[in-house]
Image: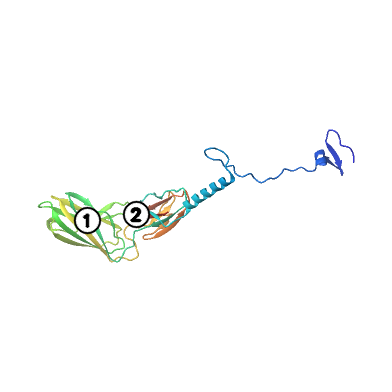
Amino acid sequence: MSQPVHGSLKVPYQGRSVPLDQRSLGRQVLERRNYMPLDMRDILTEQPLSQDAVIQNILKNTDIDILLKTLGNAYTPRVVTVNTTPTLLIPPNRTPRGYILINPSQPVALTTSTTIFASALRAVGPHLSASFGVSNYLTLRLFQDVTAIGGAGATLIVNLQTQDPLTLNWATAQSDVFALPGNLAVAGQTNYASLGGEGVDIAARLQAVVAVNSVTFSISGVLKDGLAGTGSGLPQTVYLGPQDVNTTVGFPLFEGAREVFYLRENTPIFSVAQAATPIKIFQLQ
């Protein structure tokens, strides 16, 4: 074997040039070691924690994480009214949560009753009732009870109004439905009116006009010949989805339906409906 070539630090070996350090010391490689454990320090002293202290901290954090993600049997109930524009139903949470959503609006029965005007003293002027659904009912009957008048000559006229489903404006469908003689309100008198077929309408309300003197009265209604299993009034299905949810692409929560959702962290749910609809929310703890 020839001598090293000075200046190149290489020697010939089986016809090849081999670096001198490999020729004399052998092949050198990086030493492989296991990764050093995570350097955790005390929050106050900033001194490295012992291995036992590190393990204890990991166990504590794991316990907290499990408690936050475990669903128990307790519920936090609340009610959110869903409107015709996207409404925030469930805000985002920092941890996964389970929810039970209930649409309490019930399908119609064959016959049902409703309080339209609760008994109360009403001053001179027009008074509007809350709207009530009449869709899928064939007939509507009204009962009016006058309990007191504020003075002689008090009059009471009741008009039936129906809602345009496109514009949601109200129009008078029938005027002076009770047709009292001279429109005079008589204390202690109960009046009855049958309004015939109202099933082609969707929502209705009453307008009571008091004149001359105040009148204390109530009005209730009976809806008959309903088509069982259908909805009353504007469809009260709510639609769930992101912030821009609409009634075309949203996930439907039908009248009387219940759905259970398990939401990941930072996942809000918005909802929209064709009419103001209350939704019951039970948050699992």
In this view of the protein, can residue 258 be seen by the observer? yes
Could you tell which of marks 1 and 2 lies nearer the N-terminus? 1
Q: Nearer the viewer, residue 146 or 48?
A: 48
Residue type at tag 2:
Thr
State the image quarter where residue 201 is shown.
Answer: bottom left
- Residue for badge 1: 118
Residue that lies at the very extreme toward the top in this rendered image: 7
Q: Which mark is residue 41?
A: none
The residue closer to the viewer here, 107 or 208, is: 107
Q: Residue at x 34, y 54 (%)?
A: 277
Q: Which quadrant is the N terminus positioned in? A: top right
Q: Is residue 275 visible?
A: no
Mark 2 lies on residue: 277
Is 218 positioned to the left or the right of 41 in the image? left
**Pick the front one: 211 or 66:** 66
Residue 41 at what x, y percent from top left?
56, 40
Measured from the top left, where is residue 85 in percent x and y?
37, 49
Q: Residue furthest left?
A: 152
Residue 83 is left or right of residue 220, and the answer is right
Task: Give coordinates of residue 129: x percent, y percent.
Answer: 24, 53
Quarter of the figure with residue 148 = bottom left
Q: Residue at x 59, y 46 (%)?
A: 51
| Distance between mark 1 and mark 2 Cα atoms | 21 Å
